[in-house]
Image (cartoon, grey):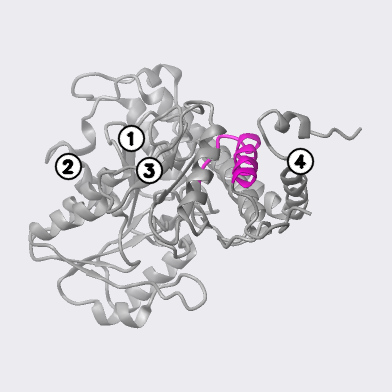
Amino acid sequence: MTIDAYPYYQKFGVSEAVYRLSEQINQDLAEKYAELELISSKRQLEVLAAFQKHQFCEAELHGSTGYGYADSGRDKLEAVLADCFQAEAAFLRWQFASGTQVLYQMLRALLKAGDELLIVSGEVYDSLKPGVAALENMGINLRYVELSLAEEASFDYPAIAAALNEKTAAVYVQKSRGYSLRPSLTSAKIGELKKFLLEQGFTKPLLVDNCYGEFVELEEPTAFGADLIAGSLIKNPGGGIAPSGGYVAGREDLVERVAEAVTAPGLGREIGPSLGHLRELGIGLYLAPLIVKEALQTAAHLAGLFSKLGYQVEPLPCGVRGDIVQIIYLENAQRLEQFCCAIQAAAPIDHHFTPVASPMPGYDCDIIMASGSFTQGSSIELSADGPMREPYTAFFQGSFNFTTGRLAGMLAATAVGAKQIGEGLE
């Protein structure tokens, strides 16, 4: 029996032409969807194995108060995360408010006046720029090497070799694209960078901003030699369940240095009450591979839809992905506003609100953002945003489930329309 789902989507305002195009795209992407399912299955079984290895008990999910001494549930959850990321140790706390906070604390903990930080992936996120400026005010020198974009994003090895010197205390990589227009980096490429650094005699830490990249690939950067990775729990690894938080994972000595900078010297990971949040953090981590797969399938579908409508997209529908972010070049302010309004309309929360471009801390221009999420700023749920500046690009990420993500994409395509009349909508 063949069931036509269009009447269900029609109730939300999806045009029939866009729905038929979406159906064709799903057929075209069957092999890509199967690849994503394979990655998710592999990572899901690793997460399950890690939980079982550390013998979590339900009673341990209730957590601790006060100092948080002897919080076995917290310690086990950190051990589970470390195992999932093939790291020696992890420091995971719900008290982190954002990925930016985690990244700044990591850098502040590992660098001192007179040190040099070599950033080899170009400019950092807009929101981290004040943080790196603060590091410079502390006497830490920052140097940048842009990525080589001849074919796809890769490191400029000659420039990196020339930039390394005796003061270079760490090399830093941003895996995701942020608001830049370059492709995301893969864990394997970061592994190639680590190998190159060792060949140059550089044995100091390779630090990775892993935000938006967790569970996207078969392995994390730590599996390829990255010394420390960091990210937010209200992105991928929190599975949309974590109410806040962040993590660092990697070499145990580096993890402990970050922990001591956050808590106090001599205390490190031993303190920090979980205050009843372990259940949410644990469920979120357990569901993360599934939720990330749904987000990636949504991104591939959106890329297929808008490429058929004549728009430039990055990555391509079947392209290599190192993060969950999908770029759509909309080319003018009106389309960007229409796109974000349509994404908001597909959300379970605040769907009746209209996104309006406005100033946002850490950014140099107005930002328009659709984020009808259960947790504020939880990009893994369903969100789209973009700076109100040329080339008026939408950055789409997330979706708890493909059905809703597909609806969001179809509503956006219906609202924005084809780039050229008749394109993709015959």
First along the sequence among labels 2 and 1: 1
Q: Position of residue 320 (x, y in %)?
A: 57, 61
Helix, strand or loop at label 4? It is helix
Q: CA distance from mark 3 to mark 1?
A: 27 Å
Q: Which residue is mark 1?
A: 245
Please tell me which residue lies in front, 63 or 102. Answer: 102
Q: Earlier in the sequence, mark 3 or mark 1?
A: 1
Q: Position of residue 197 (x, y in %)?
A: 33, 73
Say which amino acid is labelled 1: Gly
User: SS of the residue at dot 1?
Assistant: loop
Q: Residue at x 33, y 39 (%)?
A: 246
Residue at the spot x=24%, y=78% of the render? 163
Can you identify the residue that label 3 sits on?
357
Q: Nearer the viewer, mark 2 or mark 1?
A: 1
> Which residue is at the front of the view, 342 or 405?
342
Residue 253 makes an appearance in the image: no
* Marks 1,4: beta carbons within 8 A: no
Numbered mark located on residue 351 in the image:
none
